[in-house]
Image (spheres, rainbow, N blue to C red):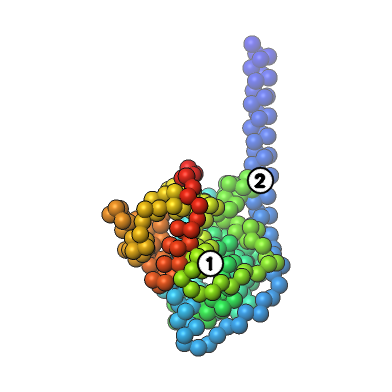
Amino acid sequence: MKKFLKWFGISVGGLFALIAIVFFVMALKGSASLSRKFDISDEQIPIPTDAESIARGEHWVKAECIGCHGDDLSGGPFVEFPFGYIDAKNLTPGKGGAGTEFIDQDWVRAIRHGVNPEGHGLLVMPATAFWYFNDEDLGAIIAYLKSLPPVDKETREPNFNLLGKALIGFGMLDKGVLIAKYIDHETRPVAPSALVSIDYGNYLVNVSGCVDCHGPTLAGGKSADPTAKAAPNLTPGGELGIWKEEDFIKALRTGVTSTGRQLDPAQMPWEHYKYFSDDEMKAIFLYLQSLPKLETIAP
């Protein structure tokens, strides 16, 4: 019996040692992933200075950026977990803001490629969606960001403890955190015509990252956020199949569906999608209605 207990103890000890080794190896792998550098070539994006273009940029920023960076775009705590935290960057030219250090090419790399001026990937930056912005819209966005009034706010650099780095090493936080590795940095987006059309609706769905929550076919899914709930089917096979155009616009404007259900802005960010124009919402609805009728996919 003593011999059995001795060997049992050795086996258990060896198992724990093996687990510890694997854990530390994955933590090193996660640390290496966080330190990875991307070599992004300069892109010559014209940055306009006229009032109309800046207003167009403001329109995009309100629809796509304030949900993370705040109404004044000064950033602040965004992801807080026991294993790490990530702050949304202050985008203004105030103290601690990107506007004090970014040149035009830095803005392009950050928005389109999810990479900071030092070449490291920005964390939880939805560049897989923003990659789709055509040069004209991207230039307008940068023009507006450069026009922001300064807000003094220091934000923290992202930080992960050993557990957080191990989780990244295991790939458990990969798609939600290390965005830049999933972007094709060599190809360029195609510019659609800004009309109420299926093509333009597809463009708006892409730049808004709808697939991140609703799945690659938009038939249902769940975002990488562990607190997220299952997102509904947006194809005609789901609830939207019986909606009218005015129902869709009302839902994005007010957060209330055709059945009177209130959308949770923490799950469905209608509070900033409401800044889309009527024509843009019509284009999105037109595109969604053009999709094949798919059964809802459970996440």
- Tell me the element at label 2: helix
Residue placed farthest to the bottom in the image? 50
Residue 9 is left or right of residue 293, and the answer is: right
Foreground: 89 or 273? 273
Q: Residue 26 — which label?
A: 2
- Tell me the element at label 1: helix
Foreground: 84 or 259? 259
Q: Residue 199 — which label?
A: 1
At 68% from the left and 60% from the top, the residue drawn is: 36
Three-letter amino acid code of the residue under disc 1: Asp
Foreground: 56 or 15? 56
Residue 16 is situated, as x and y percent measured from the top left of the image, at: 64, 32
Number of numbered tags placed on the structure image: 2
Residue 275 is situated, as x and y percent measured from the top left of the image, at: 40, 71
Vertical position of residue 17 compared to residue 247: above or below: above
- How many other residues sit within 10 Å of disc 1, few (<14), some (14-19) or many (≥20)? some
At 69% from the left and 75% from the top, the residue drawn is: 42
- In the rendered image, the quadrant that contains the N terminus is top right
Residue 95 is left or right of residue 12, and the answer is: left
- How many other residues sit within 10 Å of disc 2, few (<14), some (14-19) or many (≥20)? many
Residue 165 is situated, as x and y percent measured from the top left of the image, at: 61, 50
The quarter of the displayed image where residue 159 is located: bottom right
**Which comes before the other along the chain, label 2 or label 1?**
2
**Would you say residue 238 is visible in this rendering?**
yes
At 64% from the left and 48% from the top, the residue drawn is: 169
Three-letter amino acid code of the residue under disc 2: Met
